[in-house]
Image (cartoon, rainbow, N blue to C red):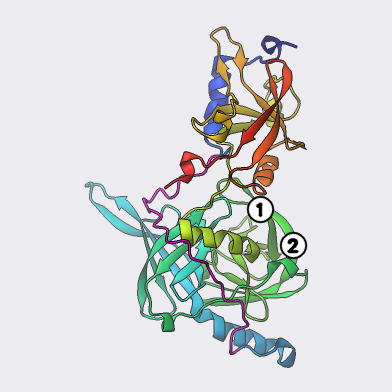
């Protein structure tokens, strides 16, 4: 079957596909922050997390459930940050000024003043302030952010002895029915405690850039706007998740909230502190699901795969010789379709994302593609793309 017979796309359709693809992540790292933050990074010193049960929390088996709630809140809440974001706006006369744009929550994770929160809490903010339930307000700066996992680290300059550190627990051993507590700032109400249980595990959710976040924790502990970035705690006062999303048509809590497992944070946070970003392998190409395109009425030569709309110069796909779609002037479209990677069939972008999450820069992918009417095997070496350099 020839390329001319199977690629029945007009130049207009070609442009539409390319345009939509530019809006997708497609293996390209999102720009850091539109607000103009620069990731300062630091020396690559080991990042050590507190993991011991905090003093002040008794053995949960030796006290009532009510007393446990009281002790966890009293001990941990001083380490839960109230984050206020501002954005730069311009009035009718062209004058620019800062205007409060939102608020969220976060957790102090070390004595250096690093605070773990959600990426979407600080995204596009031009100014950040942090408070801990008193009159003292700290200016904060973004140290690093990862839109793919919706995690970010900010930092304040505060005396070490004034900071309450929230210890990190183990999210790999959680069980449905286990008690959890959430502390945050819903609707601007400072350091609010809600309690509940783990309602489900391994829930798939999505970051705002469309990337899947696997293995999220579902809880019925009330989570509302403003809780984002705050800790989901176990009965020992250890953070087991970062509250991130709610499932609600009304915008308020209906008992279905989701938290990012702390196991992901343990892997991501050291990179954010030391480099400001996560070194995650990318193909550096705009991709579209063949199944989705066929459902939209496009005629394509395969029933599955990822159509390469465009390759980014200097990226992994480009260096491997993979080609994006283009017109040869007579209405024919030439381009590659990725059928499988390392033997894994590519049905949609999530398949690729999950595979890349298990890879590192320097790895080589065995890629099967459809090109000009036949299948070919191409080796793609994953390199650090220009979008991942500061």
Give residue 50's mark.
Answer: none
User: Is residue 29 inside the magenta stretch?
Assistant: yes
Pinpoint residue 230: horizontal percent, then vertical percent.
55, 69
Q: Residue at x 71, y 23 (%)?
A: 376
> Is residue 75 something one can see in this rendering?
yes
Distance CA(mark 1)–CA(mark 2): 11 Å
224 shown above or below 275: below
Report which quarter residue 176 is drawn in. bottom right
Mark 2 lies on a secondary structure that is strand
370 shown above or below 27: above
Mark 1 lies on a secondary structure that is strand
Discs 1, 2 touching: Cβ within 8 Å: no
40 shown above or below 65: above
Q: Is residue 91 left or right of residue 131?
A: left
Pinpoint residue 320: horizontal percent, then vertical percent.
59, 29
Q: Residue at x 62, y 71 (%)?
A: 232
Quadrant of the rendering where the N terminus is positioned: top right
Badge 1: how crowded within 10 Å, few (<14), some, or many (20+)? some
Pinpoint residue 130: horizontal percent, then vertical percent.
41, 70
**Residue of label 1:** 205
| Magenta stretch, residue numbers | 27-56
Q: Is residue 184 left or right of residue 61?
A: left
Taking depth in this image into account, of 98 and 350 the one nearest to the observer is: 350
Q: Is residue 168 left or right of residue 199?
A: left
Give residue 201's mark.
Answer: 2
């Amino acid at each position: 079957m020839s390329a001319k017979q199977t690629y029945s796309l007009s130049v207009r359709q070609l442009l539409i596909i390319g345009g939509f693809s530019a809006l997708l992540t497609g293996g390209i790292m999102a720009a850091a922050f539109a607000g103009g933050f620069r990731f300062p990074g630091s020396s690559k010193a080991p990042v050590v997390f507190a993991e011991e049960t905090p003093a002040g929390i008794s053995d949960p088996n030796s006290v009532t459930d009510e007393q446990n709630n009281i002790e966890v809140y009293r001990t941990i809440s001083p380490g839960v940050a109230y984050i206020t974001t501002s954005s730069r706006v311009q009035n009718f006369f062209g004058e620019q000024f800062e205007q409060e744009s939102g608020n969220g929550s976060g957790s102090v994770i070390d004595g250096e003043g690093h605070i773990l929160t959600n990426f979407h809490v600080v995204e596009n903010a031009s100014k950040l302030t942090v408070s801990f339930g008193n009159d003292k307000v700290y200016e904060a700066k973004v140290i690093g952010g990862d839109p793919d996992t919706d995690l970010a680290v900010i930092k304040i300059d505060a005396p070490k002895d004034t900071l309450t550190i929230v210890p990190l627990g183990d999210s790999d051993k959680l069980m449905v029915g286990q008690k959890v507590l959430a502390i945050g700032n819903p609707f601007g109400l400072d350091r609010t405690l809600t309690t509940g249980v783990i309602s489900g595990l391994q829930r798939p959710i999505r970051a705002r850039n469309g990337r899947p976040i696997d293995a999220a924790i579902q809880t019925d502990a009330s989570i509302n706007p403003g809780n984002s970035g705050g800790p989901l705690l176990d009965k020992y006062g250890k953070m087991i998740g970062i509250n991130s999303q709610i499932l609600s048509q009304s915008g308020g809590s209906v008992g279905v909230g989701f938290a990012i497992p702390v196991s992901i944070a343990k892997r991501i946070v050291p990179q954010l502190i030391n480099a400001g970003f996560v070194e995650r392998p990318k193909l550096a190409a705009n991709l579209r699901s063949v199944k989705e395109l066929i459902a939209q009425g496009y005629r394509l030569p395969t029933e599955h795969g990822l159509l390469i709309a465009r390759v980014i110069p200097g990226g992994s796909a480009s260096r491997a010789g993979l080609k994006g779609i283009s017109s040869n002037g007579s209405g024919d479209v030439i381009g590659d379709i990725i059928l499988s990677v390392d033997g894994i069939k590519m049905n949609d972008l999530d398949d690729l994302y999950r595979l890349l999450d298990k890879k590192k820069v320097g790895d080589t992918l065995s890629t099967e593609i459809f090109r000009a009417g036949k299948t070919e095997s191409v080796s793609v070496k994953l390199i650090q793309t220009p979008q991942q350099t500061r």
